[in-house]
Amino acid sequence: MVNEEQFSSKAVAARAQVLRDGGADVNQVADLLARADSQAANYGIGIILDGHGRPMPTSPELMAQTMRAGEEGAAATYLSSKPLYAELLQQVLSWQRIPKQYWDNFLLVTPSDAGTGAVNTAVQMFLMMNSKISALAVEELSWPVYQSIAASNRIGFDSYALQDEAVVASNLLTVMQAAPHNSTGYVCPPGIIRARAESCAESGLPIILDRAYPGFENAGMLASQGYDAVMQRSCDHYLLPFLQANCSFALALSPTKAFRSFTLRPCGLTLVYEPDEPKRKLLAGAMNTINRGRGSAFEHPASRAFIRSLVENRAVLELEHGQTLQRLADAQALWQKLLQGHPLAAAFSPQYAGMFRNLLGSEGCEEAFYQAHIYPVLAGNRCRINVTGIPLDEDQAQAHIDVFARLLSL
Ligand SMILES: Cc1ncc(COP(=O)(O)O)c(C=O)c1O
Protein backbone atom coordinates (compact mmCIF):
# COMPACT_ATOMS: atom_id res chain seq x y z
CA MET A 1 0.00 0.00 0.00
CA VAL A 2 1.17 3.53 -0.72
CA ASN A 3 0.12 6.84 0.83
CA GLU A 4 -1.08 9.86 -1.19
CA GLU A 5 2.39 11.47 -1.43
CA GLN A 6 3.88 8.28 -2.85
CA PHE A 7 0.92 7.63 -5.13
CA SER A 8 1.61 8.11 -8.79
CA SER A 9 -0.97 7.40 -11.44
CA LYS A 10 1.87 7.01 -13.93
CA ALA A 11 3.37 4.25 -11.80
CA VAL A 12 -0.03 2.51 -11.59
CA ALA A 13 -0.39 2.69 -15.38
CA ALA A 14 3.12 1.25 -15.75
CA ARG A 15 2.24 -1.60 -13.38
CA ALA A 16 -0.91 -2.26 -15.42
CA GLN A 17 1.26 -2.65 -18.51
CA VAL A 18 3.60 -5.06 -16.70
CA LEU A 19 0.60 -7.15 -15.61
CA ARG A 20 -0.84 -7.22 -19.14
CA ASP A 21 2.56 -8.16 -20.58
CA GLY A 22 2.74 -10.95 -18.00
CA GLY A 23 -0.47 -12.49 -19.37
CA ALA A 24 -3.06 -11.19 -16.90
CA ASP A 25 -6.44 -10.55 -18.52
CA VAL A 26 -8.10 -7.14 -18.24
CA ASN A 27 -10.34 -8.15 -15.31
CA GLN A 28 -7.36 -9.46 -13.36
CA VAL A 29 -5.41 -6.24 -14.02
CA ALA A 30 -8.23 -4.08 -12.58
CA ASP A 31 -8.46 -6.34 -9.53
CA LEU A 32 -4.73 -6.40 -8.78
CA LEU A 33 -4.34 -2.63 -9.18
CA ALA A 34 -7.31 -1.86 -6.95
CA ARG A 35 -6.02 -4.17 -4.23
CA ALA A 36 -2.75 -2.22 -4.11
CA ASP A 37 -4.44 1.20 -3.59
CA SER A 38 -5.93 1.80 -0.13
CA GLN A 39 -8.20 4.53 -1.57
CA ALA A 40 -9.37 2.45 -4.51
CA ALA A 41 -12.96 2.66 -5.71
CA ASN A 42 -13.59 -0.72 -7.31
CA TYR A 43 -15.64 -0.41 -10.49
CA GLY A 44 -13.98 -3.42 -12.07
CA ILE A 45 -14.35 -6.85 -10.60
CA GLY A 46 -17.73 -8.33 -11.26
CA ILE A 47 -19.29 -8.93 -7.89
CA ILE A 48 -22.18 -7.00 -6.40
CA LEU A 49 -20.84 -4.14 -4.27
CA ASP A 50 -22.72 -2.81 -1.28
CA GLY A 51 -22.52 0.96 -1.78
CA HIS A 52 -19.58 1.27 0.63
CA GLY A 53 -16.96 -0.17 -1.72
CA ARG A 54 -17.27 -3.68 -0.26
CA PRO A 55 -18.77 -6.78 -1.83
CA MET A 56 -22.25 -7.58 -0.50
CA PRO A 57 -21.99 -10.42 2.02
CA THR A 58 -22.06 -14.04 0.92
CA SER A 59 -25.49 -15.65 0.92
CA PRO A 60 -26.21 -16.42 4.62
CA GLU A 61 -28.14 -19.52 3.51
CA LEU A 62 -25.21 -20.91 1.50
CA MET A 63 -22.75 -19.96 4.22
CA ALA A 64 -24.73 -21.89 6.86
CA GLN A 65 -25.26 -24.90 4.60
CA THR A 66 -21.56 -24.96 3.66
CA MET A 67 -20.48 -24.95 7.32
CA ARG A 68 -22.88 -27.84 7.90
CA ALA A 69 -21.57 -29.71 4.84
CA GLY A 70 -17.98 -29.12 6.01
CA GLU A 71 -18.73 -30.62 9.41
CA GLU A 72 -20.43 -33.62 7.85
CA GLY A 73 -17.27 -34.12 5.78
CA ALA A 74 -15.25 -34.77 8.94
CA ALA A 75 -16.87 -38.20 9.18
CA ALA A 76 -15.10 -39.22 5.95
CA THR A 77 -17.95 -41.17 4.51
CA TYR A 78 -19.07 -41.30 0.87
CA LEU A 79 -21.00 -38.09 0.27
CA SER A 80 -22.69 -37.35 -3.00
CA SER A 81 -25.71 -35.33 -4.03
CA LYS A 82 -26.61 -37.73 -6.85
CA PRO A 83 -29.68 -39.08 -5.03
CA LEU A 84 -31.04 -35.53 -4.95
CA TYR A 85 -30.69 -34.95 -8.70
CA ALA A 86 -34.31 -35.57 -9.73
CA GLU A 87 -35.55 -33.14 -7.09
CA LEU A 88 -32.71 -30.72 -7.87
CA LEU A 89 -33.65 -30.58 -11.54
CA GLN A 90 -37.23 -29.68 -10.65
CA GLN A 91 -36.10 -26.97 -8.24
CA VAL A 92 -33.70 -25.45 -10.78
CA LEU A 93 -36.39 -25.41 -13.48
CA SER A 94 -38.79 -23.84 -10.98
CA TRP A 95 -36.21 -21.20 -10.00
CA GLN A 96 -35.84 -20.36 -13.68
CA ARG A 97 -39.67 -20.30 -14.11
CA ILE A 98 -39.48 -22.75 -17.02
CA PRO A 99 -42.99 -24.04 -17.88
CA LYS A 100 -43.62 -27.62 -16.72
CA GLN A 101 -44.51 -28.87 -20.20
CA TYR A 102 -40.79 -28.72 -21.13
CA TRP A 103 -39.32 -30.36 -18.03
CA ASP A 104 -39.07 -33.94 -19.33
CA ASN A 105 -36.62 -32.89 -22.06
CA PHE A 106 -34.01 -31.49 -19.66
CA LEU A 107 -30.84 -33.11 -18.36
CA LEU A 108 -28.65 -31.71 -15.58
CA VAL A 109 -25.09 -31.97 -14.28
CA THR A 110 -23.43 -29.92 -11.54
CA PRO A 111 -19.83 -29.19 -12.59
CA SER A 112 -17.40 -27.70 -10.12
CA ASP A 113 -16.20 -24.12 -10.69
CA ALA A 114 -19.53 -22.31 -10.68
CA GLY A 115 -20.70 -20.61 -13.90
CA THR A 116 -17.32 -20.96 -15.59
CA GLY A 117 -17.44 -24.71 -15.02
CA ALA A 118 -21.02 -24.79 -16.30
CA VAL A 119 -20.03 -23.10 -19.59
CA ASN A 120 -16.87 -25.18 -19.97
CA THR A 121 -18.80 -28.40 -19.43
CA ALA A 122 -21.37 -27.42 -22.07
CA VAL A 123 -18.56 -26.62 -24.53
CA GLN A 124 -16.77 -29.91 -23.88
CA MET A 125 -19.97 -31.89 -24.17
CA PHE A 126 -20.89 -30.42 -27.58
CA LEU A 127 -17.30 -30.90 -28.78
CA MET A 128 -17.54 -34.54 -27.81
CA MET A 129 -20.81 -34.90 -29.73
CA ASN A 130 -19.72 -33.08 -32.89
CA SER A 131 -16.27 -33.41 -34.45
CA LYS A 132 -16.99 -30.64 -37.02
CA ILE A 133 -16.85 -27.86 -34.41
CA SER A 134 -13.62 -25.90 -34.79
CA ALA A 135 -14.35 -22.61 -33.00
CA LEU A 136 -16.38 -20.98 -30.27
CA ALA A 137 -18.46 -17.97 -31.39
CA VAL A 138 -19.53 -15.39 -28.80
CA GLU A 139 -21.10 -11.93 -28.89
CA GLU A 140 -18.66 -9.05 -29.47
CA LEU A 141 -17.17 -7.39 -26.36
CA SER A 142 -18.00 -10.44 -24.25
CA TRP A 143 -16.55 -11.78 -21.01
CA PRO A 144 -12.83 -12.45 -21.74
CA VAL A 145 -12.88 -15.93 -20.17
CA TYR A 146 -14.64 -17.31 -23.26
CA GLN A 147 -11.30 -16.95 -25.05
CA SER A 148 -9.61 -18.98 -22.32
CA ILE A 149 -12.32 -21.65 -22.58
CA ALA A 150 -11.81 -21.86 -26.36
CA ALA A 151 -8.01 -21.97 -26.08
CA SER A 152 -7.99 -24.55 -23.29
CA ASN A 153 -10.29 -26.78 -25.37
CA ARG A 154 -7.96 -26.25 -28.35
CA ILE A 155 -10.54 -24.65 -30.61
CA GLY A 156 -10.55 -21.28 -32.38
CA PHE A 157 -12.41 -18.18 -31.33
CA ASP A 158 -14.81 -15.97 -33.24
CA SER A 159 -17.33 -13.29 -32.43
CA TYR A 160 -20.61 -12.01 -33.84
CA ALA A 161 -22.42 -8.67 -33.50
CA LEU A 162 -24.78 -8.02 -30.61
CA GLN A 163 -27.60 -7.49 -33.13
CA ASP A 164 -26.88 -10.49 -35.37
CA GLU A 165 -29.94 -12.66 -35.98
CA ALA A 166 -28.47 -15.81 -37.52
CA VAL A 167 -25.67 -16.95 -35.30
CA VAL A 168 -25.08 -20.60 -36.15
CA ALA A 169 -22.68 -22.23 -38.62
CA SER A 170 -21.73 -25.89 -38.87
CA ASN A 171 -18.15 -25.38 -37.65
CA LEU A 172 -19.07 -22.94 -34.87
CA LEU A 173 -20.29 -23.59 -31.38
CA THR A 174 -22.32 -20.49 -30.55
CA VAL A 175 -22.66 -18.99 -27.10
CA MET A 176 -25.27 -16.36 -26.36
CA GLN A 177 -25.59 -14.60 -23.04
CA ALA A 178 -29.16 -15.16 -21.92
CA ALA A 179 -29.16 -12.20 -19.55
CA PRO A 180 -27.86 -8.62 -19.76
CA HIS A 181 -24.65 -8.87 -21.74
CA ASN A 182 -21.34 -8.82 -19.90
CA SER A 183 -19.69 -6.35 -20.75
CA THR A 184 -22.07 -3.88 -22.43
CA GLY A 185 -25.28 -4.41 -20.45
CA TYR A 186 -27.11 -4.75 -23.77
CA VAL A 187 -30.49 -6.40 -23.41
CA CYS A 188 -31.05 -8.28 -26.62
CA PRO A 189 -34.50 -7.37 -28.03
CA PRO A 190 -37.14 -10.14 -28.30
CA GLY A 191 -37.17 -10.06 -32.14
CA ILE A 192 -33.45 -10.85 -32.32
CA ILE A 193 -33.71 -13.63 -29.76
CA ARG A 194 -36.61 -15.20 -31.67
CA ALA A 195 -34.62 -14.99 -34.94
CA ARG A 196 -31.62 -16.65 -33.27
CA ALA A 197 -33.83 -19.42 -31.91
CA GLU A 198 -35.32 -19.97 -35.37
CA SER A 199 -31.89 -20.09 -37.02
CA CYS A 200 -30.78 -22.73 -34.50
CA ALA A 201 -33.90 -24.78 -35.03
CA GLU A 202 -33.60 -24.61 -38.83
CA SER A 203 -29.94 -25.62 -38.86
CA GLY A 204 -30.37 -28.29 -36.17
CA LEU A 205 -27.25 -26.92 -34.49
CA PRO A 206 -27.10 -26.47 -30.72
CA ILE A 207 -26.43 -23.21 -28.87
CA ILE A 208 -25.13 -22.51 -25.37
CA LEU A 209 -27.20 -20.03 -23.37
CA ASP A 210 -24.95 -18.57 -20.71
CA ARG A 211 -27.08 -17.25 -17.89
CA ALA A 212 -24.81 -15.89 -15.17
CA TYR A 213 -27.18 -12.98 -14.40
CA PRO A 214 -30.75 -14.37 -14.34
CA GLY A 215 -33.41 -11.71 -13.99
CA PHE A 216 -30.88 -8.87 -13.75
CA GLU A 217 -32.51 -7.06 -16.68
CA ASN A 218 -35.69 -6.69 -14.61
CA ALA A 219 -34.12 -5.56 -11.31
CA GLY A 220 -35.87 -2.19 -11.54
CA MET A 221 -39.33 -3.78 -11.39
CA LEU A 222 -38.63 -5.95 -8.34
CA ALA A 223 -40.01 -3.48 -5.78
CA SER A 224 -43.27 -2.90 -7.65
CA GLN A 225 -43.93 -6.33 -9.19
CA GLY A 226 -42.06 -8.86 -7.08
CA TYR A 227 -39.50 -11.62 -7.63
CA ASP A 228 -41.81 -14.07 -9.35
CA ALA A 229 -42.67 -11.53 -12.08
CA VAL A 230 -38.98 -10.63 -12.50
CA MET A 231 -37.99 -14.25 -13.11
CA GLN A 232 -41.04 -15.18 -15.20
CA ARG A 233 -40.46 -12.26 -17.50
CA SER A 234 -36.78 -13.15 -17.78
CA CYS A 235 -37.61 -16.73 -18.77
CA ASP A 236 -40.19 -15.53 -21.32
CA HIS A 237 -37.65 -13.15 -22.82
CA TYR A 238 -34.47 -15.23 -22.95
CA LEU A 239 -35.47 -18.91 -22.75
CA LEU A 240 -38.99 -19.40 -24.06
CA PRO A 241 -38.11 -18.57 -27.71
CA PHE A 242 -35.62 -21.49 -27.75
CA LEU A 243 -38.11 -23.84 -26.12
CA GLN A 244 -40.93 -22.84 -28.45
CA ALA A 245 -38.71 -23.21 -31.54
CA ASN A 246 -37.76 -26.75 -30.43
CA CYS A 247 -34.01 -26.02 -30.35
CA SER A 248 -31.29 -28.12 -28.76
CA PHE A 249 -29.46 -26.00 -26.25
CA ALA A 250 -27.36 -26.04 -23.12
CA LEU A 251 -28.17 -23.64 -20.33
CA ALA A 252 -25.26 -22.66 -18.09
CA LEU A 253 -26.35 -21.25 -14.72
CA SER A 254 -24.17 -19.72 -12.05
CA PRO A 255 -24.83 -19.15 -8.35
CA THR A 256 -22.02 -16.57 -8.07
CA LYS A 257 -23.77 -13.29 -8.81
CA ALA A 258 -27.36 -14.21 -8.01
CA PHE A 259 -26.55 -15.62 -4.56
CA ARG A 260 -23.21 -13.89 -3.98
CA SER A 261 -21.40 -17.20 -3.48
CA PHE A 262 -18.07 -16.12 -4.92
CA THR A 263 -16.07 -16.82 -1.75
CA LEU A 264 -17.50 -20.36 -1.51
CA ARG A 265 -17.26 -21.30 -5.20
CA PRO A 266 -19.93 -24.02 -5.29
CA CYS A 267 -20.80 -25.93 -8.44
CA GLY A 268 -22.49 -24.44 -11.47
CA LEU A 269 -25.52 -25.96 -13.15
CA THR A 270 -25.38 -27.18 -16.75
CA LEU A 271 -28.75 -28.09 -18.14
CA VAL A 272 -29.29 -29.52 -21.59
CA TYR A 273 -32.56 -29.23 -23.45
CA GLU A 274 -33.00 -31.84 -26.15
CA PRO A 275 -36.50 -32.57 -27.50
CA ASP A 276 -35.34 -35.66 -29.46
CA GLU A 277 -35.28 -38.68 -27.15
CA PRO A 278 -32.55 -40.79 -28.82
CA LYS A 279 -30.30 -37.71 -28.98
CA ARG A 280 -31.07 -36.93 -25.35
CA LYS A 281 -29.83 -40.39 -24.36
CA LEU A 282 -26.55 -39.81 -26.20
CA LEU A 283 -26.21 -36.40 -24.57
CA ALA A 284 -26.82 -37.87 -21.12
CA GLY A 285 -23.85 -40.20 -21.67
CA ALA A 286 -21.65 -37.36 -22.93
CA MET A 287 -22.59 -35.09 -20.01
CA ASN A 288 -21.82 -37.79 -17.50
CA THR A 289 -18.45 -38.51 -19.13
CA ILE A 290 -17.41 -34.86 -19.23
CA ASN A 291 -18.53 -34.23 -15.69
CA ARG A 292 -16.66 -37.31 -14.43
CA GLY A 293 -13.55 -36.07 -16.22
CA ARG A 294 -13.76 -32.78 -14.35
CA GLY A 295 -13.79 -34.42 -10.91
CA SER A 296 -14.69 -37.63 -9.15
CA ALA A 297 -18.12 -38.36 -7.69
CA PHE A 298 -17.14 -36.71 -4.41
CA GLU A 299 -18.15 -33.08 -4.42
CA HIS A 300 -16.80 -30.00 -2.71
CA PRO A 301 -18.72 -29.21 0.50
CA ALA A 302 -19.88 -25.89 -1.00
CA SER A 303 -21.41 -27.77 -3.95
CA ARG A 304 -23.24 -30.19 -1.67
CA ALA A 305 -24.44 -27.19 0.31
CA PHE A 306 -25.71 -25.35 -2.78
CA ILE A 307 -27.53 -28.42 -4.04
CA ARG A 308 -29.11 -29.04 -0.65
CA SER A 309 -30.17 -25.38 -0.42
CA LEU A 310 -31.85 -25.50 -3.80
CA VAL A 311 -33.65 -28.70 -2.85
CA GLU A 312 -34.65 -27.76 0.70
CA ASN A 313 -34.66 -23.99 0.84
CA ARG A 314 -35.16 -22.50 -2.62
CA ALA A 315 -37.46 -19.83 -1.21
CA VAL A 316 -34.63 -18.51 0.98
CA LEU A 317 -32.20 -18.45 -1.94
CA GLU A 318 -34.77 -16.59 -4.02
CA LEU A 319 -35.15 -14.02 -1.24
CA GLU A 320 -31.38 -13.50 -1.27
CA HIS A 321 -31.35 -13.26 -5.06
CA GLY A 322 -34.01 -10.55 -4.67
CA GLN A 323 -31.68 -8.61 -2.32
CA THR A 324 -28.94 -8.75 -4.95
CA LEU A 325 -31.36 -7.45 -7.57
CA GLN A 326 -32.55 -4.66 -5.28
CA ARG A 327 -29.00 -3.41 -4.70
CA LEU A 328 -28.47 -3.42 -8.46
CA ALA A 329 -31.75 -1.54 -9.01
CA ASP A 330 -30.76 1.11 -6.43
CA ALA A 331 -27.31 1.56 -8.01
CA GLN A 332 -28.77 1.90 -11.50
CA ALA A 333 -31.32 4.46 -10.25
CA LEU A 334 -28.52 6.56 -8.73
CA TRP A 335 -26.54 6.51 -11.99
CA GLN A 336 -29.67 7.59 -13.84
CA LYS A 337 -30.33 10.40 -11.39
CA LEU A 338 -26.78 11.76 -11.34
CA LEU A 339 -26.28 11.48 -15.11
CA GLN A 340 -29.49 13.27 -15.96
CA GLY A 341 -29.01 15.48 -19.04
CA HIS A 342 -25.58 14.00 -19.86
CA PRO A 343 -25.15 11.89 -23.04
CA LEU A 344 -23.92 8.94 -20.91
CA ALA A 345 -27.44 8.69 -19.44
CA ALA A 346 -28.30 6.72 -22.60
CA ALA A 347 -26.30 3.80 -21.13
CA PHE A 348 -28.97 3.62 -18.43
CA SER A 349 -31.95 3.60 -20.81
CA PRO A 350 -34.12 0.43 -20.91
CA GLN A 351 -31.94 -0.98 -23.73
CA TYR A 352 -29.20 -1.59 -21.14
CA ALA A 353 -29.31 -3.29 -17.76
CA GLY A 354 -27.42 -5.45 -15.32
CA MET A 355 -24.11 -5.06 -13.56
CA PHE A 356 -22.02 -3.73 -16.44
CA ARG A 357 -21.75 -0.99 -19.01
CA ASN A 358 -18.98 -0.74 -21.61
CA LEU A 359 -18.11 2.76 -22.81
CA LEU A 360 -15.49 4.41 -24.96
CA GLY A 361 -12.55 5.87 -23.10
CA SER A 362 -10.94 9.13 -24.20
CA GLU A 363 -7.22 9.44 -24.95
CA GLY A 364 -5.21 9.19 -21.74
CA CYS A 365 -8.18 8.11 -19.62
CA GLU A 366 -6.27 5.28 -17.97
CA GLU A 367 -3.99 7.51 -15.93
CA ALA A 368 -6.82 9.96 -15.25
CA PHE A 369 -8.89 7.13 -13.71
CA TYR A 370 -5.98 6.04 -11.52
CA GLN A 371 -5.40 9.65 -10.48
CA ALA A 372 -8.99 9.65 -9.18
CA HIS A 373 -8.39 6.19 -7.56
CA ILE A 374 -11.11 4.72 -9.76
CA TYR A 375 -10.52 1.22 -11.13
CA PRO A 376 -12.82 0.09 -13.95
CA VAL A 377 -11.79 -2.66 -16.40
CA LEU A 378 -9.81 -1.02 -19.19
CA ALA A 379 -9.33 -2.87 -22.46
CA GLY A 380 -7.84 -0.95 -25.38
CA ASN A 381 -10.05 2.10 -25.79
CA ARG A 382 -12.98 0.50 -23.93
CA CYS A 383 -13.93 0.85 -20.30
CA ARG A 384 -16.16 -1.64 -18.49
CA ILE A 385 -17.88 -0.35 -15.37
CA ASN A 386 -19.42 -2.45 -12.62
CA VAL A 387 -22.35 -0.15 -11.88
CA THR A 388 -22.72 -1.40 -8.29
CA GLY A 389 -19.38 0.28 -7.51
CA ILE A 390 -21.26 3.55 -7.05
CA PRO A 391 -21.25 4.72 -3.40
CA LEU A 392 -24.50 5.30 -1.52
CA ASP A 393 -23.11 8.66 -0.37
CA GLU A 394 -24.39 10.98 -3.11
CA ASP A 395 -21.55 13.51 -2.86
CA GLN A 396 -18.97 10.78 -3.31
CA ALA A 397 -21.09 9.22 -6.05
CA GLN A 398 -21.34 12.56 -7.85
CA ALA A 399 -17.55 12.99 -7.69
CA HIS A 400 -17.09 9.58 -9.33
CA ILE A 401 -19.78 10.24 -11.92
CA ASP A 402 -18.07 13.52 -12.84
CA VAL A 403 -14.88 11.58 -13.60
CA PHE A 404 -16.75 9.00 -15.73
CA ALA A 405 -18.70 11.75 -17.52
CA ARG A 406 -15.47 13.60 -18.30
CA LEU A 407 -13.52 10.58 -19.58
CA LEU A 408 -16.09 8.39 -21.31
CA SER A 409 -18.51 8.53 -24.20
CA LEU A 410 -21.02 6.11 -25.73
C1 LIG B 1 -21.01 -14.00 -19.01
C2 LIG B 1 -20.49 -14.79 -17.87
N1 LIG B 1 -20.61 -16.12 -17.90
C3 LIG B 1 -20.15 -16.89 -16.91
C4 LIG B 1 -19.54 -16.33 -15.81
C5 LIG B 1 -19.00 -17.27 -14.78
O1 LIG B 1 -19.28 -16.99 -13.51
P1 LIG B 1 -18.67 -17.71 -12.26
O2 LIG B 1 -17.70 -18.76 -12.69
O3 LIG B 1 -18.01 -16.64 -11.49
O4 LIG B 1 -19.86 -18.29 -11.59
C6 LIG B 1 -19.39 -14.95 -15.73
C7 LIG B 1 -18.71 -14.33 -14.61
O5 LIG B 1 -18.31 -13.21 -14.60
C8 LIG B 1 -19.89 -14.16 -16.79
O6 LIG B 1 -19.80 -12.83 -16.78
Image (tube, helix red, strand yellow):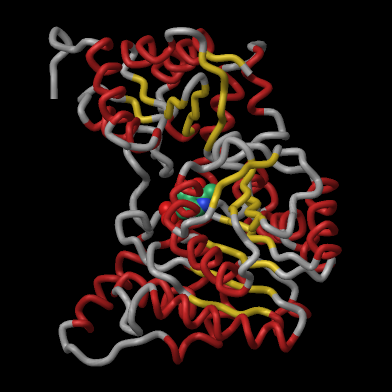
Quarter of the image with the N terminus is: top left
Q: Pick whichever, 234 or 240, lies toward us.
A: 240
User: Horizontal placement of 392 versus 250: left or right?
Assistant: left
Quarter of the image with the C terminus is: top right
Residue 293 lies, in percent from the top left, at 39, 76
Residue 12 lies, in percent from the top left, at 26, 18
Q: Pick whichever, 398 or 302, lies toward us.
A: 302
- For the point 82% across and 65% down, the residue is 201
Residue 302 lies, in percent from the top left, at 32, 70
- For the point 63% across and 54% down, the residue is 175
Q: Pick whichever, 267 or 126, lies toward us.
A: 126
Residue 161 lies, in percent from the top left, at 71, 37
Q: Quadrant of residue 391?
A: top left
Does the image show residue 141? yes
Q: Quadrant of residue 108?
A: bottom right
**As drawn, 295 above or below 83:** above
- For the point 24% across and 32% down, the residue is 35
User: Horizontal placement of 119 versus 138: left or right?
Assistant: left
User: Horizontal placement of 26 versus 78: left or right?
Assistant: right
